[in-house]
Amino acid sequence: MKIQSVTAAIIATLICAAGPALALPTTGQKPAAATPAAVDGINWYDGDVDAAFAFAKAHNKPLFLYWGATWCPPCNQVKATIFNRQAFIERSRFFVPVHIDGDSPGAQKLGERFKVRGYPTMILFKPDGSEITRLPGEVDAERYLQTLTLGISANRPVKQTLQAALSGGKLTADEWRLLGYYSWDTDEQQLVASKDLFPTLKRLAAACPPGETANRLALSALVAAATATPGNIPEIDKAAAVVLLTKAASDTRIARENMDLLTNYPTDLVGLATAPQSPARAKLIGVWTTALQRLALDTSLSKTDRLSALAAQVSLARLDSPEAKLMPALLKEVRQRVAQADAATTDAYERQSVINTAAHALGDAGLLDESDTLLKAELKRSHAPYYFMLSLASNAKKRGDKTAAINWYEQAYQAAQGPATRLQWGAAYLSGVLELAPQDEARIEKVAHGLFQELAGTQNAFYERNRSVLERLGHKLVDWNAGGKHQAVVQRLRTQLDGVCAKLPDADAQRATCQGLLSPTRA
């Protein structure tokens, strides 16, 4: 899932919650309960996941699985705009809601089982345990609730629906809509392999009856193409893409319907469809900016979504001139909108999302000092201040202040809470030192040694999100040692890691992952 308004530096290290207001039960910390426990009007299941699936099957109810973590801004946004709605609470009576906190015991192994990685991921299952759909966390609340309702009443799992659509079978309008609003960002290749996502969505858009859903699928296909890994970006019909994107941005209804795509991927899509400095690009940016201005003023959207539309304007303005100064009018608007959102947002969950988006809008606009001021003030208010410390590190990097950036990475790691979170923040700290101070062998070894010590005491440390974080970190350490420049340090770390791996059972898949982390073959 694309994380709204998070800088590339953080995205490179983390994938994006749970907090105090909902007091969601932590899966795995309590024995399986015979009945759900009511929490703030939602009957989040008070027991382990297998017991919840058994309960759902016995009572012939769908099961709603929410996978998140305390710090994640989009997760906090979901709780502030969806989970607290009476309409969601009422719909929750028709399914068994289950929350898995990514830091709870056994959570990462469950993540491997359900193929969930990005926070938040929300899946609706049939009573028999088959997936109905993965719900889109970045659409507005009304669209989310409509999709949830369609899922509850769906007659077949999404995999069967997709197969029918691709084979020319007959789908109802509701089934097409479920495919259109399926969370392709959090699919984790359950339905479609990454390399096949663009052609699959393109085929679906062509097969779908003309209308809103077909538009959504066609736009999603372009997003898949634009965000493909380097070297795997497919060839597209750019002229057709420009027509489609222009129509989506210039039509008020279509733009509102696909608000999440327009605000999350503006530079990706414009960059895919047009050449740098071309008249076609300038024209498309103009149309897109007008659409974003409307969305930024749309009070039916959440504060985070409106700020995201503002931040997207900044991104488009910098697309071909990353270092150019923005127009004074846009800078003024960024300052004003951020100040208004800051003053108007009192809910702790909503602030985690709003302040994140606001700080990055300021930073991307070149207002780094003002971004820092906002973030530092939030450290005293946030239930997960360590998240914002990473943003402060990113701002310091933009200034070229390597010492300050490393210090913020260190503070963030020291403040982080929860085993999976601490592992990720420790990896962010070590990655920061490797990038900004590669000559500081002593510090790199000290940080890595401490991280591996903590790793040894972490349950299921090599599953799912943890695994992906550790594998990226292993690549960076091996690259740092290219040519044997730091062989003595890496060899000591490899010996330490071997001790961690040796304590894992031979048959446990974690052991192979552990043993491969610092393998020279990664070079």
Image (cartoon, grey):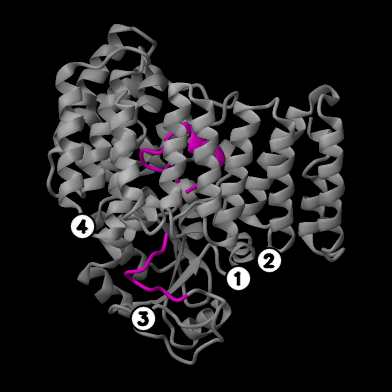
Q: Can residue 108 be seen?
A: yes
Q: Are marks 4 and 2 in contact (CB under 8 Å)?
A: no
Residue at image point 51% right, 58% down: 159
Kindly state the secondary structure of the residue where label 1 is placed. loop
Q: Are marks 3 and 2 in contact (CB under 8 Å)?
A: no
Q: Earlier in the sequence, mark 4 or mark 2?
A: 4
Q: Earlier in the sequence, mark 2 or mark 1?
A: 1
The residue that label 2 is drawn on is 459
Kindly state the secondary structure of the residue where label 2 is placed. loop
Q: Decide: is 276 above or below 313.
A: above
Q: Earlier in the sequence, mark 3 or mark 4?
A: 3
Amino acid type, callout 1: Pro
Does the magenta stretch mainly form a helix, a strand or a loop?
loop
The image quarter containing residue 152 is bottom left
The residue that label 4 is drawn on is 346
The part of the chain drawn in magenta is 1-25
The residue that label 3 is drawn on is 43
**Viewer-nearest of labels 4 and 2?**
4
The percent coordinates of residue 475 (x first, y second) are: 72, 35
**Viewer-nearest of labels 1 and 4?**
4
- Give the number of the disc on residue 282: none
Amino acid type, callout 4: Thr
The percent coordinates of residue 8 (x first, y second) are: 47, 32
The residue that label 1 is drawn on is 105
**Viewer-nearest of labels 3 and 4?**
4
Q: Earlier in the sequence, mark 3 or mark 2?
A: 3
Q: Earlier in the sequence, mark 1 or mark 4?
A: 1
Q: Are marks 2 and 1 in contact (CB under 8 Å)?
A: yes
